[in-house]
Amino acid sequence: MDLEEVYLEDEDINLDNVNVKKELTIVYMGTPDFSATVLEGLLTKYKVRVVVSQPDRPVGRNGEVRPTPVKEVANNHTILTLQPEKIRTDYQSILEFEPDLIITCAYGQIIPDELLNAPRLGCINVHASLLPKLRGGAPIHRCILEGHSKTGITIMYMSSKMDAGDIITQREIDIDYEDTAESLHDKLSILGRDLLLETLPSIIDGTNTRTPQDESQVTFGYNIKREDELIDFSRTTREIYNKVRGLYSWPGAYTTIDGKILKVWKSRESLTTYPNLFDGQITNIYPDGFGVKTSNGEIILTEVQPEGKKRMSGRDFVNGNKDLVGKMLR
């Protein structure tokens, strides 16, 4: 019998037994460049139904309002972007999409339980540390500031407690001696993009593992505050070197000279000791900058930015400022 001769009456079809494959509805939540890189990668393999990002803010000296990096990616792919001011109360429009999966990455607001519990496949997060180490909003800065030798990416289920959900997958990388927060950010954004793509198939088909975090190993990578940016020259040379590179290229470490702010963008270590000088006192002039006494040696400042001026090499700063040796940085 030819297939064309087979007919089914309407009453013979039981729709309850028909398995209709529904297109996966993914909601992506993120804001900065890091998250934009991850989203770009996601879109090479998956369709994202809607993007959620922080509201656009003024940026730069001119205060021009620009779309967030994640919104720019969404616009380039003609994806709708929602930007609630306070997602704790303004989340209903997201629920109306009936998401199967919510993916978050550096979104920037606490996500309410109503959203966390809505997707059938859960709400997952791409976090830039090896959880449970460095929960919080600035794990990339903090791992360098604290002198860690390794960091990585964690894909995890979200919970109502910050970065405390079960771990799905992790990938580790070394922190190089010359890494800055900027260079490490770029490495981790690529790692996060790739690990998410590797992990998603197991989440979608339900074969992924989930490992509770060891609460005894928890540390925090809190957002950087203004007081974190000030250099304390009573610290060791390595600690100061880590501060300078851990805050590069945003927001930057700083000190003061003659009562004016001096941003410090780059430095190098020196083990030369000056037992008769005070911590923070300028020690010597070098071909690439000038030295400052620390608790166990000196730090050579090789790129700085005087208050109200552009960045310059340490040597250019020396050339424009006479009698630096012996002055105090505070």
Image (cartoon, helix red, strand yellow):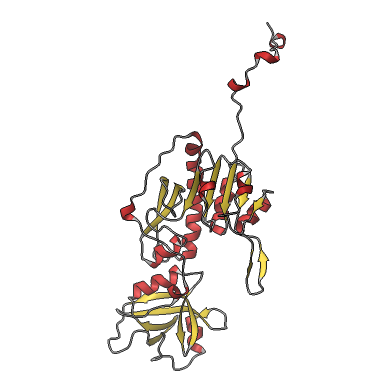
What is the x, y in percent for residue 108?
Answer: 53, 59
Q: Quadrant of residue 87?
A: bottom right
- Residue furthest to the top in view is 1
What is the x, y in percent for residue 329?
Answer: 41, 85
Q: Quadrant of the N terminus?
A: top right
- In the displayed structure, 310 sits above or below 186; it is below
Give the residue at x 72% y 11%: 4
8 relative position to 233: left or right:
right
The foreground one among 49 and 244 is: 49
The foreground one among 123 and 192 is: 123
- Residue furthest to the front in view is 89
Give the residue at x 67% y 74%: 62
- Residue furthest to the left in view is 275
What is the x, y in percent for residue 238?
Answer: 35, 72
The foreground one among 176 and 240 is: 240
The foreground one among 43 and 268 is: 43
- In the displayed structure, 13 sits above or below 115; it is above
- Residue furthest to the bottom in view is 323
What is the x, y in percent for residue 228?
Answer: 43, 73
Give the residue at x 30% y 86%: 274
Give the residue at x 31% y 54%: 216
* Count of number-bearing discs: 0
Q: Quadrant of the C terminus?
A: bottom left
